[in-house]
Amino acid sequence: MNNKSKKEFREPVSIEELERTLADLRSAVRAGNPLLKAVASSRLYPALSLVLGLAAVAFCFMARNAARNFPGLRLSARAWIFLAAIVVAGVVGKVLIAARLAVRHGKHSFYSLMTAIYGGKTASMIASSTIAMLAGIFFLISIDHPWYIVPIVAIYTGLASHALDLMIDLPEYRILGWVSMASGIVSLFFIEADPLLWTAVVTAAIFVVFGFVGLALASRRGKGRRG
C-alpha cells in the first residue's frame, strides 16, 4: 500500500486531539500579542474608565432630576458639551496611555501597538462591525428613536470585549463583555420609558464595573508577580 492509500485510511482525529490542537492555537495567538496584553492589563485603563464612568453617571442623574423637576425642560448646550467632553477625554486619555505604555514596553512604538490591535485580518472585522453599528445609529436617528443608540453601543462593546479576550486572555475583558451585553439587551426593553436612567445603568455597566474589576485584577496580578 502506497503512502497515498495510507493517508486515505488514516483514523479520524479524536475529540481530545482536536481540543488539544485548538488549545495550542489559542495559546499561540495569545503569545503572539505580548504588547497588546501588556498595555491592556495596565491599571491606567480601568482607572480612567472608572473616573469617566462615574462622571457620566452623575451627569445622567443630574439631567434626569432636572427634567423631572422642570417638565418640558430641554438640556442646555452646556450640558451636552460637558457630556461630549467626557467622551473626548476618554478617547484622548486612552490614546495617550496606549502611547506611553507602548513606548515603555521594550523597543516597540505606538505604531506597533496600533498594528497589533487593528492590523491584519482584524482590521476587516473591526471595519465591518463599525460600519454596521454606524448604519444602525443613523437609522435610529432617522426614525426619531436616538435613545436606542445606547443599547446598540453596549451590545457592540460586549462583542468587541469578547473578541479582545480571545486575543489576550484577560478576565476583566470577559466580564466586561458579559456585563455590557446584558445591560444592552435589558435596556432595549426599557430605555424609551426612562432614557437617562437606563443610559446611566448602561454607562455604569460598561465603565464603572470595568474600572472596579480591572483595578482589582491588576492589583492581584501585581501581587502575584511580586510573590
Image (cartoon, rainbow, N blue to C red):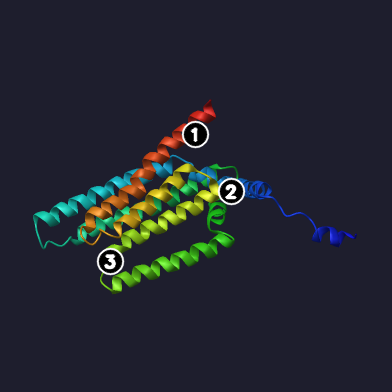
- Tag 1: Cα neighbours inside 10 Å, few (<14), some, or many (≥20)? few
Q: How many marks?
A: 3
Q: Residue furthest bottom?
A: 142
Q: CA distance from mark 3 to mark 1?
A: 40 Å
Of residues 164 and 16, the one drawn nearer to the viewer in this rendering: 16
Residue at 37% from the left image edge and 69% from the top image edge: 136
- Tell me which numbered mark, 1 or 2, is placed earlier along the sequence: 2
Amino acid type at mark 2: Asn
- Tell me which numbered mark, 3 or 1, is placed earlier along the sequence: 3
**Where residue 221 sits: x, y (%)?**
49, 34
Quadrant in the picture for residue 194: bottom left
Residue 130, compared with residue 83, is above or below; it is below
**Of labels 3 and 2, the one closer to you:** 3
Q: Residue furthest top?
A: 227
Of residues 43 and 17, the one drawn nearer to the viewer in this rendering: 17
**Where residue 173 sits: x, y (%)?**
45, 47
| Residue identifier under label 2 | 33
- Tell me the SS state at disc 3: helix
142 to the left or right of 93: left
Q: Are marks 1 and 2 in contact (CB under 8 Å)?
A: no
- Tell me the SS state at disc 1: helix
**Where residue 60 sits: x, y (%)?**
23, 52
Amino acid type at mark 1: Arg
| Residue identifier under label 1 | 221
Residue at 46% from the left image edge and 36% from the top image edge: 218
Q: CA distance from mark 1 to mark 2?
A: 18 Å
Residue at 14% from the left image edge and 57% from the top image edge: 67
- Tell me which numbered mark, 3 or 2, is placed earlier along the sequence: 2
Of residues 102 and 70, the one drawn nearer to the viewer in this rendering: 70
| Residue identifier under label 3 | 146
Residue at 79% from the left image edge and 56% from the top image edge: 10
